[in-house]
């Protein structure tokens, strides 16, 4: 999940430092890193529900 490719988010990812954690249970949802020159989060498979947005 590269920041320049994200269309919408409920979190302020630009100012978020570190791994993405669940606000309810505290489990790690994604690991933060850099891919090329983009800040990236690698999602932990099976921990996150994702869907493709329609109309974009």
Image (cartoon, rainbow, N blue to C red):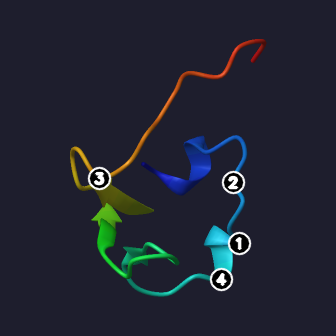
CA gap, disc 2 and disc 1: 7 Å
Please rate how many residues cluster around mark 3, counting C-alpha atoms within 10 Å: few if below 14, some from 14 to 19, many from 20: few
- Residue 9: give its label: 2
Taking the image as drawn, is residue 23 in sight? yes
> In the rendered view, would you say 2 is above or below 49?
below
The image shows residue 33 at horizontal and vertical percentages of 30, 71
What residue lies at 71% left-to-right and 14% top-to-bottom? Answer: 54
CA gap, disc 4 and disc 3: 23 Å
Quick check: marks 2 and 1 in contact, CB under 8 Å? yes
What residue would you read off at disc 4? Answer: 15
Q: Earlier in the sequence, mark 3 or mark 1?
A: 1
What residue lies at 29% left-to-right and 56% top-to-bottom? Answer: 42
| Left or right, residue 8 beside residue 27 | right
Discs 3/1, front: 3
| Left or right, residue 7 beside residue 28 | right
What residue would you read off at disc 1? Answer: 12
The image shows residue 1 at horizontal and vertical percentages of 42, 48
| Left or right, residue 24 beside residue 34 | right
Quick check: marks 4 and 3 in contact, CB under 8 Å? no
> In the rendered view, would you say 3 is above or below 33?
above
Quarter containing the C terminus:
top right
Q: Residue furthest bottom?
A: 17
What residue lies at 39% left-to-right and 77% top-to-bottom? Answer: 25
Discs 4/3, front: 3
CA gap, disc 2 and disc 4: 13 Å
Classify mark 3: helix, strand or loop.
loop
What residue would you read off at disc 3? Answer: 47
Q: Earlier in the sequence, mark 3 or mark 2?
A: 2
Q: Earlier in the sequence, mark 4 or mark 3?
A: 4
Discs 4/1, front: 1
């Amino acid at each position: 999940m590269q920041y320049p490719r994200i269309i919408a988010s409920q979190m302020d990812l630009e100012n978020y430092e570190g791994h993405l954690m669940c606000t309810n249970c505290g489990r790690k949802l994604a690991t933060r890193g850099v891919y090329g020159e983009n800040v990236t989060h690698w999602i932990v498979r099976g921990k996150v529900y994702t869907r493709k947005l329609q109309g974009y």
